[in-house]
Structure formats: structure tokens, C-alpha cells
């Protein structure tokens, strides 16, 4: 039986009852309710990536800031993982939160929740990655108002946005044997 890498099992779904923001009888009366951004596999590490990645990450962060400002109604960022190369963070106090996220993405872009899941590169150093105790996890964060960290209230989680008629479902298989799920 073939096994897929963990990163290929990552899933975040945004389930809508209708198109986000199209609440009108026709295209002329439709108004946008909100927007959101999606990013993944954006992590950078000087040892793993050399001098190539930092510039690219800066370009993406700058473009996100520009779009965030122009849109003016971004409600959240969906982060599909692989955020902290090469192996994740060890705790909520790990310096990588600052050097690899807060110091890269503008305070504007970080002024909304980043709905997140683990990528395979986020799990190596994280003491909660192979534990049933989510309190040990360096990225698990139950507090939607804590904008100094990603919002990830579990390895797999669900959140309903009544104001947007939107549901978010985030699923990540857990590694317990060192192998990804079939």
C-alpha cells in the first residue's frame, strides 16, 4: 500500500451556502460581504533555503500587505501549513514566531486571525506533534483574539462564521507511527 506524504493530506475547507459576498438577485445588485487570503508553504530558513527564500518571502509579505490594504475587508488569512522551516516551533515562546512570522508579515496582515493547520515541516521540533496532549503543541492556540499566534484550536478543527454564512473545516492527520495515513 502506498503512503502519501503528510503534506498531501492537509485539508482546509471553506463551505459556503452561496458565493461569498454575492447576496443579490443578479450580478448588478451583488455586493461583496468580505474577503480572505490564503497562503501555504511560505516558511523560510536560511540553512535550508540559502539566500533565495528570504527575498521571495518578503515579496509575498509585501504583496499581501498591499492587497490587504486595497481590499479593506479581509476577515482572516487561511494558512495551510509549512510555516516554520525546517522543523516547526518548540513552544508559543519560540523566537521563530517573531523572526519568521511577526517580523515578516505586516501588523495589518496580522490584525486578523490566521486560521491554520500544521504542515509536515511544522511538526519535527513541536513537542505536541506526536502527543495526545495538545497543551504541549507549539502552534495549538484556542484563543481567537490572540493575534500574536495562529488560531488553531486543535489538530483538526471547525469554526462557523455566521456573519459570512461560512464554515471552516481544518483537517490534518496525526502522525503516531512516523508514517502518514494511507
Image (spheres, grey):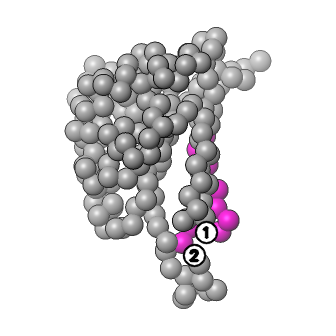
Q: Is residue 8 shown to the viewer in this render?
A: no
Q: Which mark is residue 123?
A: none
Quadrant of image for the C terminus: top right
Q: Position of residue 122 (x, y in %)?
A: 45, 25
Q: Which mark is residue 22?
A: 2
Against 164, residue 27 (above or below) is below
Q: Is residue 100 left or right of residue 127?
A: left
Q: Position of residue 140 (x, y in %)?
A: 47, 31
CB under 8 Å between discs 1 and 2: yes
Q: Position of residue 104 (x, y in %)?
A: 25, 41
Q: CA distance from mark 1 to mark 2?
A: 6 Å
Which span is picked out in magenta? Answer: 11-21
Quadrant of image for the N terminus: top right
Residue at the farthest bottom position: 28
Label 2 residue SS: loop
Asked if residue 24 is among those painted magenta in the image, a careful observer would answer: no
| Residue pictured at 57% horizontal, 31% vertical | 155
Q: How many tags in the picture?
A: 2
Amino acid at each position: 500500500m502506498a503512503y502519501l506524504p503528510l503534506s498531501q493530506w492537509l485539508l482546509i475547507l471553506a463551505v459556503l451556502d452561496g458565493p461569498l459576498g454575492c447576496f443579490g438577485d443578479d450580478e448588478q445588485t451583488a455586493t461583496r460581504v468580505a474577503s480572505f487570503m490564503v497562503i501555504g508553504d511560505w516558511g523560510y530558513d536560511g540553512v535550508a533555503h540559502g539566500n533565495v527564500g528570504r527575498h521571495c518571502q518578503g515579496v509575498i509579505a509585501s504583496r499581501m500587505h498591499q492587497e490587504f490594504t486595497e481590499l479593506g475587508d479581509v476577515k482572516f488569512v487561511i494558512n495551510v501549513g509549512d510555516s516554520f522551516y525546517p522543523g516547526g516551533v518548540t513552544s508559543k515562546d519560540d523566537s521563530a514566531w517573531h523572526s519568521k512570522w511577526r517580523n515578516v508579515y505586516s501588523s495589518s496582515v496580522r490584525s486578523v486571525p490566521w486560521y491554520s493547520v500544521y504542515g509536515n515541516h511544522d511538526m519535527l521540533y513541536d513537542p505536541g506533534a506526536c502527543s495526545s496532549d495538545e497543551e504541549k503543541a507549539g502552534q495549538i492556540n484556542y484563543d481567537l483574539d490572540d493575534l500574536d499566534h495562529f488560531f488553531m484550536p486543535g489538530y483538526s478543527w471547525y469554526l462557523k462564521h455566521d456573519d459570512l454564512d461560512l464554515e471552516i473545516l481544518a483537517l490534518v492527520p496525526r502522525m503516531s507511527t512516523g508514517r502518514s495515513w494511507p
